[in-house]
Image (cartoon, rainbow, N blue to C red):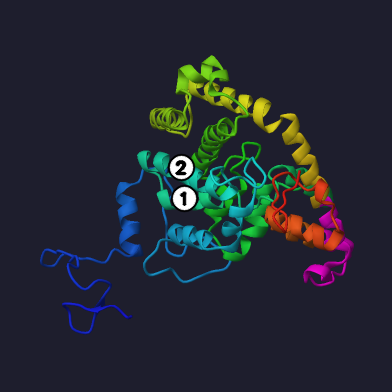
Amino acid sequence: MHGHEGPVPGLRTAHGEGVARLTLQPGEPVLCGREEREAEEERQLARGATRASGAGRRGRPEEPDELRTCFELDRDRILHSTAFRRLAGKTQVFVFPDDHQRTRLTHALEVAQVARSVARALRLNVALTEAIALGHDCGHGPGGHASEDALAPYLAEGFDHAVHGADVVLAPLNLTREVLDGVRNHSWTRPAPSTPEGEVVSWADRIAYCAHDLEDAAAAGLVSVDELPSEVVTACGTTRGAQLGAFVGDLVRSSAAAGLVAMSEEMAGALASLRRFNYERVYMRPESRAQARAVARLLSALVEHVARRPGDVGLPEPAQSSAALRAAVTYVAGMTDRFACLTAMRLLDWPVEQLPRGFDLPGGGRGR
């Protein structure tokens, strides 16, 4: 089927009847391409917001897109990339989560929603903010933050998912410098991003994971919201919706008043208290630490095997041992949780009892 014969000769429509029409005043332009949106940004964005310009500042020069600004193009490239899709199979907090728990992909989408809300209210560049938010965790390895500890010893500079995401994983997409800078520096331990949009994503990341990780842990029966510190309950409530509303509202109001992206002392303290509660009761509980050790052992073994025998996974033989390790780290870091476990079982005869818990085994069994 190639659509329906529409009211305009030579054109097809998706539906046969009741097709909505574009109602235009005489002489009213309908097309809103890149140049029109760049002009709109100039009129509407705050003075310190980042403006899109032509093809943007990229490592490899490109021609500007006809319809999209440079940051809209970056957002779309990230959204359609293999690295972004793989986040669906990577741990946020729980390895091999159930149907309702977050993955690294749903985390990225929630960060993007929070960041968009803040950026729009502050008249910042929403497309740039969204691109950074969607790409910010594309450098994460399988198994959550335990992968950073596992992979760091094999690289002289260590392994930081933010840097790896910008400089290795997303580099083939030829993104703008502003997006890569925001991804590279979204972590609070990194230097400040060069744009206010990058600063917004740094806050949105922490706000989103503090709220949704608590919700997942409570739904799993690991904690009760009744145990939350009084400082958190008083400032932002006990539900994810209330917490997001309180933190986002304060971030917007405080930033607008100060002229820089910042949160009030009271609400920043509540966010820190919520994050500390999650660390003590969720991330660092004995079962989580055991899971992290299981993940680290598996990933270390995979890196060392792939470095010794790159042909087993289809990688070329490198000229130097350091290059072999770097290639192995990049390959293993790109794995989803499930693929890492299956590869370890296939190449290393990895014992089932040493797999991270929750792994669905071939034949319907489950790892312990």
Is 113 one of the magenta-colored residues?
Answer: no
Q: Are marks 2 and 1 in contact (CB under 8 Å)?
A: yes
Is 317 one of the magenta-colored residues? yes
The residue nearer to you, when weighing 317 against 87, is: 87
Q: Which residue is mark 1?
A: 130
Image height check: is 187 above or below 285? below
In this picture, residue 73 sits left or right of residue 294:
left
> Is 14 left or right of 213, judged from the image as shown?
left
Q: Quadrant of the N terminus?
A: bottom left
Which residue is painted at 65% across and 30% down in the image? 282
Q: Disc 2 marks which amino acid? A: Ala
Q: Of 88 and 40, which appears nearest the observer?
A: 88
Helix, strand or loop at label 2? It is helix
The spot of residue 38 in percent (x, y) is: 35, 58
Task: Please tell me in which quadrant of the rendered image residue 168 appears.
Answer: bottom right
Is residue 150 visible in the rendered structure shown here? yes
Main secondary structure found in the magenta portion = helix
Question: What residue sits right under mark 2 in the picture?
Answer: 115
Q: Relative to residue 145, is residue 127 depicted above or below?
A: below
For numbered disc 1, what is the local secondary structure?
A: helix
Q: Earlier in the sequence, mark 2 or mark 1?
A: 2
Percent x, y for residue 266?
49, 19
